[in-house]
Image (spheres, rainbow, N blue to C red):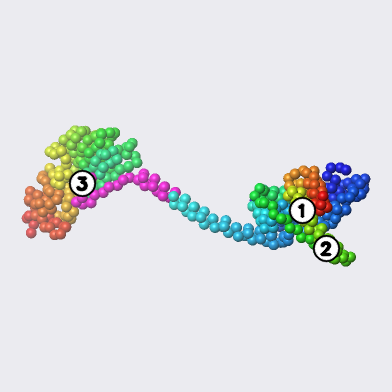
Amino acid sequence: MNTDTKDNVCDEEVYSTLFRANSKTVFNYIYYKYGNEEKAYDAVQEAFARLWENCAKVTPAKAKAYVYTIANNLYLNVLKAEKVRLKYADRVTTTNHETPEYVMEENEFKLKLDNALQALPENQRTTFLLNRIDGKKYAEIAEMEGVSIKAIEKRMHLALKSLREQIDGI
Amino acid sequence: MQENYLAKWLNNELTEEELAVFKKSDEYASYQRILEASKTMEGPDFDVEDALQAIKNKRILQEPKVVQLKPFRRFLKVAAAVTIIMVGSYFYLNTLNENITTQFAENKEVILPDSSEIIMNADSKIAYSKKKWDTERNVSLNGEAFFKVAKGERFTVTTDHGTVAVLGTQFNVEGREGFFEVTCFEGLVSVSYKGSETKLPAGTSFMVVEGEIVPAEEPKNLNPSWMDNESTFKSIPLKYVLDEFQRQHNVKVKTQNIDLGKLFTGTFSNTNTDLALQSISVPSRIKFKLEGNKVLFYAESAP
């Protein structure tokens, strides 16, 4: 085991950097899939613990894909999806020109959007949220999910379409 | 519109024409609104530093478990060493010779691996190798013993004086200091003494006293007399008679003014000390004084 080179995952610093860069996304990824915060947290712990155990075999370049794969496989066919609860930041409500009616309408819209998100198939919801909340590029999501970029584009397109249809009540 | 145009639109990959058409569509406002709303969404709280600390702590907790295995490994090392020593010493001890000794006034019967029998007289010692017995039937003797040899390969008895070799027979060997006697009771015994070999047919004896071959009396019985708890002598210097008496009765013998070279013919009991003393002293015309386990022989004429 070689620990003194900087491009080795066994190096404490390299490992910490990898953790800081990717743990939040792993957490969200699992959460978007199953709506279970506790399990998402466990997935992060498990995936990164395994990364440490195999730090000699996994290069830093492949570490990201490695942790996603482990987190993804962890609950595959085991966990039933629960309701995904999302918070809305206070940004919109702080703008000054809103009337009570506007706030009410806005809240109503968010409720609709919430429900529409719940109704989405798991893979569409995950793709949509990873892109919207975590700002992940289609290519990155494709890598995480292990599918082509085109498939992600399709999911994204269908997700948006379904959301609008749900909200507009079509 | 191209395939998955909504996804393309999010990525700003629509052509200007397409975008213009899309913007005019009824749904555009709704999509725009969905994007606006989703911009403010957040997942559950996740503290990266907390999680990192947690995983490092867990690692520290797990590491001592690995350390705990080490004493066990050390135990294994010790166990392995002990096993090697035990197995080694077992094989080593196995190669060592079997040693059997008799004390004064003690007879012992020994069965050899091929069911040959050895009956040992008092103060005698035999040794043989159990491991090599199949290839080499050899017993080394110091003292006196009677052999009943099972039929088979050459059987040898080694003494300080000479070697006795047989195939399957019954014979008595006595090899003590200054005294070597072989008596054959059955079969044929070959005695090699100082390089010369003597064949002893059944019922003959070969005797060496003080380094000189002496003609020996033919044995009358089927067994040596000591096996019937008697010691028989025919023209044997008194010294050896008294030595034998000392061995059979575990009594310390002292002499005073006695000619130990005087020849003795007779028999004494190996069980009754008083009787044996009479048997020795009367024909030799000497006197004795018994005190505990010490006996003094002295000349009759002595004051």
Residue range highlighted in magenta = B84-109
Q: Which residue is mark 3?
A: B121
Amino acid carrying mark 3 in the image: Asn
Q: Which residue is mark 1?
A: A117
Q: Which SS class for mark 3?
A: loop
- Label 3 to label 2: alpha-carbon separation: 122 Å
Question: Does residue A8 show up?
Answer: no
Q: Which residue is mark 2?
A: A104
Amino acid carrying mark 2 in the image: Met
Callout 2 and callout 1 share a chain? yes
- Label 2 to label 1: alpha-carbon separation: 20 Å
Give residue B64's quadrant in the image: bottom right
Q: Which SS class for mark 1?
A: helix
Q: Residue at x 80, y 45 (%)?
A: A154
Q: Which SS class for mark 2?
A: helix
- Answer whether residue B95 is magenta in the image: yes
Within-10-Å neighbours for mark 3: few <14, some 14–19, many 20+: many
Callout 3 and callout 2 share a chain? no
- Answer whether residue A137 is magenta in the image: no
Q: Position of residue A104 (x, y in %)?
A: 83, 63
Query: In the image, which is nearer the foreground, mark 3 or mark 1?
Result: 1
- Label 3 to label 1: alpha-carbon separation: 108 Å
Q: Is residue B51 left or right of residue A155?
A: left
Amino acid carrying mark 1 in the image: Leu
Query: In the image, which is nearer the foreground, mark 2 or mark 1?
Result: 2
Q: Position of residue B202 (x, y in %)?
A: 18, 34
